[in-house]
Amino acid sequence: MNKRKLLIVEDDPGLQKQLKWSFENYEIEVAGDRASAMEALRRLEPPVVTLDLGLPPDPANASEGLMTLSEILRVAPTTKVIIVTGNDDRDVAVKAVGQGAYDFYEKPIDPDVLSLIVERAHRLHELEAENRRLAASVREPLSGVIAGSTQMLEVCRRIEKIAPTDTTVLLLGESGTGKEVLARAIHELSARRDRRFIAINCAAIPETLLESELFGYEKGAFTGAAKQTKGKLEYADGGTLFLDEMGDLPTPLQAKLLRFLQERVIERVGGREEIAVETRVICATHKNIKAQIQQGQFREDLYYRISELTVSIPPLRERPGDSILIARVLLNKFRQANNAQVRDFSPASLAAIETYEWPGNVRELENRVKRAVIMADGPVIEPFDLELDAPETNGFRTLREIREEAEAAAIQQALAASSGQVGKAAEMLGVSRPTVYHLMKKYNILG
């Protein structure tokens, strides 16, 4: 088994010897100044470095140590640097943590305590490396869609089945869940991919202008109509028209759109000529259209036309793990776009992202990450950069907690199904009767 690597940057020969003895189970490299530390860092690539701030040529001050810290993080930004400092340099050590150091430890050295800090730093480095590996292995199941949750992957599978057809699709979901992204994915996976994809927001255009936007108009149809103009439906001929916020479509236009969907012809405003248009329509809304139908705000016959196939998009809060996946992709995107020095989220930030409800869904997440990348002062994004509260816990349940919850639920379900007969419950669960009694006692389940 390979030993863990550790670089010790310390100019005092006595402390060098003590530290080497304390970490005899590690692959150790010792450096006494910045130049030798950087050479060892590049050669050894240690996950963890202990760094004394008082280095030559100016061991009485922390300037050389802080410069070494800065250079280490520039060359190896994922390295965990533990500052080893005297009591008089506590303020400088805190400053170093603010500049990206993992932690600090005050002399005199207690080998057991320092070993614990180094061990914890190694474990965090390994977890972050695994997290990056998993994030890198995540592929966009559809163009523009970042997802790893079962809920969203199921949506993507439905989209893949729907896309090659010419059916009208209704996308249902809260604002900011990515309805337009999925509509574009449907278009890109269809035979219409080489033709236009045109999107229009029915709630963003005044009712008096929406009809001409959709259907076009003839010259002289109204004041200011100086020339014949095609509408969005015509421009999307052979391609796809995406009607967002369909629940806000005015009632008069609902009848006109219904006629188009039934007969595939349109008439421009002020015109009499019927124009054949072969456009696929995808609609989306965050509203409850069935409730609108009952209230007389939406035509039932139009609803059945636009919902030949319906896809419900879960909100971000119901997609476990996706918020962190999306946040990391956005971080890389905005870091490159803004040439920012921010390199990662802190563990507290990841917990805050995972536990926050995200009422604005992906759109809100994108906004917060972009602002944090621009405004963050340090190398990692903290919860306050995202304007989120740091959770009291790390936000993640342990595997043990999940297993115990599942065991308790399984015992309760089996006992209910067997009318409380422990023998039958044990048979159903594939375990012995004593095991069931043991688990009942463990989880305080009454027979």
Image (spheres, rainbow, N blue to C red):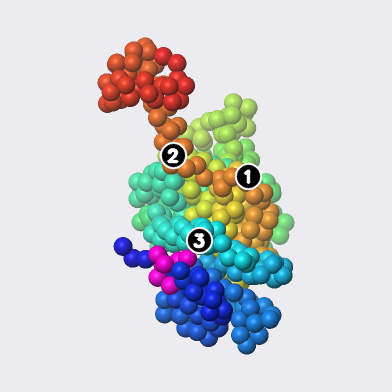
For the residue carrying disc 2, how many other residues have a C-alpha within 10 Å: few (<14), some (14-19), or many (20+)?
A: few
Residue interval drawn in magenta: 22-28
Which is more N-terminal, label 3 or label 2?
3
Name which residue lies at 42% across and 58% down. Answer: 130
Type of amino acid at the residue the image marks with label 3: Ser
Residue 235 position within the rendered picture, expressed as x and y whole percent measured from the top left: 51, 59
Residue, disc 3 = 115
For the residue carrying disc 1, how many other residues have a C-alpha within 10 Å: few (<14), some (14-19), or many (20+)?
A: few
Depth check: give the residue in front, 165 or 334.
334
What is the distance, in whole Å, between disc 1 and disc 2 at their CAs?
19 Å
Residue, disc 1 = 392
Type of amino acid at the residue the image marks with label 2: Arg
Residue 193 position within the rendered picture, expressed as x and y whole percent measured from the top left: 40, 59
Name which residue lies at 37% across and 46% down. Answer: 157
Residue, disc 2 = 400
Which is more N-terminal, label 2 or label 1?
1
